[in-house]
Amino acid sequence: MYIDKDLLIRPIEERDLLRLWELIYKDDAPEWKKWDAPYIPHKSMPYEQFIKTNNFVDKENFWVICVDEVVCGIVSYYFEDDQRRWLEVGIVLHEAQNWGKGLGTRSLKLWINHIFNTLPLVRVGLTTWSGNERMIRVGEKLGMQTEARIRKVRYYEGNYYDSIRMGILREEWEAINFPHKV
């Protein structure tokens, strides 16, 4: 568990499952999906199916974000390669009232700290699309650099968007977050 004032990230517990289903799978077209890879189809599912098909409890790579002890989103990571050296992070704040308040930046900072504290990696990456300017700003605020821009590969509502790959090296992260370290 990592805490920053009223915000914390922690592993998912059984008691979180109903809330996660409500945030993620209850609706066919939730507002958050317009920003989180909207070019990939999303389908709602009944709670009973969600429980049978999604085992999120105690996963190392999928945690909840809580504000004032209320689950409001998730942070995650996955590996791009079989060697488990190329890691990408993800974050979703599912309700619009939580957007634009810095919660995403704070959550992702805690998550990247956790990753660098627990995994022997030299880099953490974040992939988004050019239509999600807020996510790009979060990456920039955390010190990530744009490492790749794959032009016009994401198609959404009749328009093409770029895929944006950002990343930060461990030594860059430590220089920003531990400036007094010798």
Image (cartoon, rainbow, N blue to C red):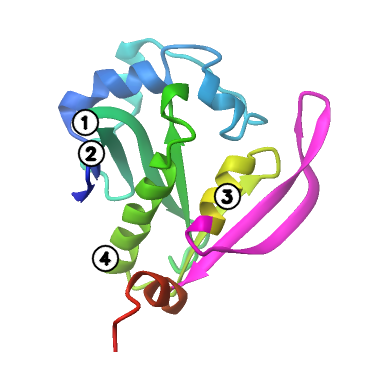
Q: Alpha-carbon distance for marks 4 and 2?
A: 23 Å
- Magenta region: 141-169
Q: Nearer the viewer, residue 23 or 136?
A: 136
Residue 167 belongs to the span the image colors magenta = yes
Left or right position of 142 against 16:
right
Q: Alpha-carbon distance for marks 1 and 2?
A: 5 Å
Query: Which dot marks residue 118?
Result: 4
Based on the displayed image, in which of its 4 quarters is residue 62 positioned? top left
Residue at the bottom extreme?
A: 182
In the picture of the structure, the residue carrying the numbered disc 2 is 6
Query: Which dot marks residue 137?
Result: 3
Q: Residue at image x 81%, y 37%?
A: 160
Sequence-first disc among 4 and 2 = 2
- The three-letter amino acid code for the residue at tag 4 is Thr
- The three-letter amino acid code for the residue at tag 3 is Arg
Dot 3 falls on a residue whose secondary structure is helix
Left or right position of 20 against 36:
left
Based on the displayed image, in which of its 4 quarters is residue 93 positioned? top left
In the picture of the structure, the residue carrying the numbered disc 1 is 68
Whether the residues at callouts 4 and 2 have beta carbons within 8 Å, the answer is: no
Whether the residues at callouts 1 and 2 have beta carbons within 8 Å, the answer is: yes
Q: Residue at image x 51%, y 64%?
A: 143
Left or right position of 101 against 35:
left
Dot 1 falls on a residue whose secondary structure is loop
- The three-letter amino acid code for the residue at tag 1 is Asp
